[in-house]
Image: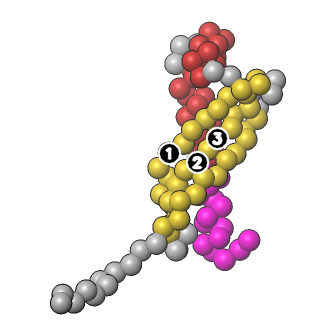
Amino acid sequence: MTKITLHDHYEFVSVARIYEITDQFCTARVSVHAMVDQECDVDINDVEVEWYINGQRTIYSGFKKLYEELFGINSYKKYSESVCSAAEDATYSYYQTLKSGAK
């Protein structure tokens, strides 16, 4: 019989943190999907955004078109990136707080 010995072991937990980011124009519901290890190190692997105006969920392509018609060509990309970045930063900050031992 072959001898099997565990050489190493890593555990990761899959998490989804969902944030609502609201400004004067709309609300973005941002889902941050990540893997978190035992030391609270975070590896974000996906970010999804749903856009809401007046509490109603919008269709992605319609929201993008409206935003660019109001604020200029390629303005949507910058806006979307800033919303995603804010949610990613909040996720990193949360796990950094846990890592440092504070709650």
Amino acid type of the residue tagged 1 in the rendering: Asp
Classify the position of the C terminus by image quarter.
bottom right
Q: Are marks 2 and 3 in contact (CB under 8 Å)?
A: yes
Q: Which residues are magenta?
A: 88-103
Against 101, residue 67 (above or below) is: above
Circle 3 sits on which residue? 30
Mark 3–mark 1 distance (CA, rounded to whole Å): 10 Å
Residue positioned most to the left: 1
Mark 1–mark 2 distance (CA, rounded to whole Å): 6 Å
Against 85, residue 93 (above or below) is: below
Q: Secondary structure at mark 1?
A: strand
From the image, give the main secondary structure of the stretch colored magenta: helix
Residue 59 is labelled as none
Residue 32 is labelled as 2
Task: Give left or right: position of 16 versus 24.
Answer: left
Q: Are marks 3 and 1 in contact (CB under 8 Å)?
A: no
Task: Report x, y in % for residue 92.
Answer: 59, 58
Residue positioned most to the front: 1
Residue 46 is labelled as 1
Identified at 81% across, 23% down, the residue is: 54
Amino acid type of the residue tagged 2 in the rendering: Val
Amino acid type of the residue tagged 3 in the rendering: Val
Identified at 52% across, 74% down, the residue is: 38
Q: Quadrant of residue 81?
A: top right
